[in-house]
Amino acid sequence: MSKKLVVYFSASGVTKAAAERIAKGIGADLFEIKPKTPYTKADLDWTNKNSRSTLETNDPNSRPEIAEKLPDISGYDRVFIGFPIWWYVAPKIIDTFVESCDFSGKTLVPFATSGGSGMGRTAEVLKSLCPSANWKNGKVINGMSEQALADWANSI
């Protein structure tokens, strides 16, 4: 049996709730990616072209700092990475996380919550940042029950 880890970034709590349900459903450990500088409501205003989240998304070199020490992933075979979708991609803090760990030979499974869009270019962007991992197709998991989330996660 493989050891599983669910890591997630959640700006509003929606992704956190989903990550907790997945971890519970598959018996995985859980780790929250927290930004060193927390996001304010104004930072997350997607209608403002000068909001922090908009500026980060539009800057390919943006790598927001993570507040806490990253988990030791050496003992995990499968890592689920959760996040909200921002402008059809993962928030840049996910890029920071993916580039900060050695995922060689590990299976990575992205999952997302979204206010209305699909995964967009997320998979291709993340794969390009960490080509040594075995990436599985991502999934937007809005509205899935705990059982449906566990069934999906266990099928990978």
Image: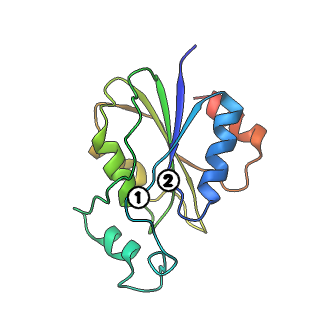
Residue 17 x, y percent position in the rendering: 67, 51
Amino acid carrying label 2: it is Phe
Q: On the image, which quarter does residue 30 sit in?
A: top right
Residues under numbered marks 2 and 1 in contact, where contact means CB atoms less than 8 Å apart: yes
Q: Name the residue beneath numbered marker 1.
A: 35
* Left or right: 82 in relation to 38: right
Q: CA distance from mark 2 to mark 1?
A: 8 Å
Q: On the image, which quarter does residue 37 sit in?
A: bottom left
Residue 115 x, y percent position in the rendering: 60, 68
* Label 1, residues with CA under 10 Å away: few <14, some 14-19, many ≥20: some
In which quadrant of the rendered image does the C terminus lie? top right
Nearest the eye: 45 or 113: 45
Residue located at (28% from left, 44% from top): 99
Residue 130 x, y percent position in the rendering: 29, 39
Q: Secondary structure at mark 2?
A: loop
Query: Which of the two discs, 2 and 1, labels the residue nearer the N terminus?
Result: 2
Residue located at (40% from left, 26% from top): 106
Q: Secondary structure at mark 1?
A: loop
Q: Name the residue beneath numbered marker 2.
A: 9
Residue located at (49% from left, 80% from top): 45
In which quadrant of the rendered image does the N terminus lie? top right
